[in-house]
Image: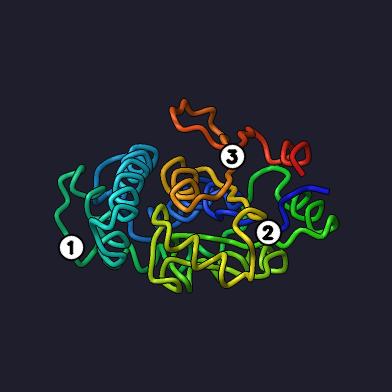
Amino acid sequence: MNKYQHLFFDLDHTLWDFDKNAETTLTGIFEYFDLNTRVNAAFDDFYQKYLFHNQELWERYHKGLISADDLKWKRMWRTMLDFKVADEPLAKEISARFLEVLPTQKKVFPYTFEILDYLKNKNYQLHLITNGFEKTQWSKLKNSGLDKYFTHVITSEGSNSLKPKKEIFEFAINKAGANIKQSIMIGDNLDADIQGAMNAGMDSIFVNHINAATDINPTYTVTHLKELEQIF
């Protein structure tokens, strides 16, 4: 019998394909706001700048250096500044539109539904721990059909903490009525998910979709979700 009973997943970049869904959303927004004319650049250039600023600001948010509201609109603001467009009201309008449309997207990583069905059929208790925003994450789950798999969904807003702080993991363990030795964190982010789990004394699985190099030693590493079947 496997020692793990409670499996805590990350959502974005682990199961729900944030980059592909963001690209689809921003493609429509780019056209809707006629940004080709405003920034005088092609969509691909705009999107690559957005990815850079989004990642940087999420890292700052993880560390508690900026607020959720700052993250939401400043990724757009900084992207536009790269094209010498200093229009804060437009950045906030684009951000609002982005947050409205993004959660309606449905792209997940290959084998997501298959692995969740496999784990449910083996009677594992599945939960989520996410730094995403409460309303947004629930919308993603419902629109993509992932909501039916998870017993508890713990967000940074709901727990009043953030990965990689140990408090959000302790909050999740308590909410699930789990034992930390029978629990494991499964995620793609080395800092938020893997180091965060280690901070809480919890085992972890690094879902290394992009074959990233790492000095951190998770309990397990997989490069494809199907490989979880070898662990469970």
Q: Give the foreground label among 3 and 2.
A: 2
What amino acid is labelled 3 in the image?
Val
Residue 22: percent from the left, percent from the top? 47, 52
Depth check: 96 or 57 in front?
57
Q: Check whether the beta carbons of the residues at disc 2 and disc 1 lie within 8 A of each other.
A: no
Q: Which mark is residue 121?
A: none
In 3D space, how far apart are the residues under numbered discs 2 and 1 (Cα atoms)? 44 Å
Depth check: 221 or 175 in front?
175
Residue 170: percent from the left, percent from the top? 49, 63
Above or below, 80 relative to 131: above
Say which residue appears at 74% left-offset and 54% top-offset.
Answer: 116
Residue on which disc 1 sits: 88
Residue on which disc 3 sits: 207
SS label for mark 1: helix
Q: Give the foreground label among 3 and 1.
A: 3
What amino acid is labelled 2 in the image?
His
SS label for mark 2: strand
SS label for mark 3: strand
Say which residue appears at 23% left-offset and 56% top-offset.
Answer: 65
Say which residue appears at 44% left-offset and 60% top-offset.
Answer: 131
Mark 3 or mark 1: which comes first in sequence? Answer: 1
Q: Which mark is residue 6?
A: 2
Depth check: 95 or 211 in front?
211
Say which residue appears at 61% left-offset and 65% top-offset.
Answer: 141
Residue 134: percent from the left, percent from the top? 47, 71
What amino acid is labelled 1 in the image?
Glu
Disc 2 residue crowd, few under 14, some 14–19, many 20+, Cα 10 Å? many
In 3D space, how far apart are the residues under numbered discs 3 and 2 (Cα atoms)? 17 Å
Disc 1 residue crowd, few under 14, some 14–19, many 20+, Cα 10 Å? some
Disc 3 residue crowd, few under 14, some 14–19, many 20+, Cα 10 Å? many
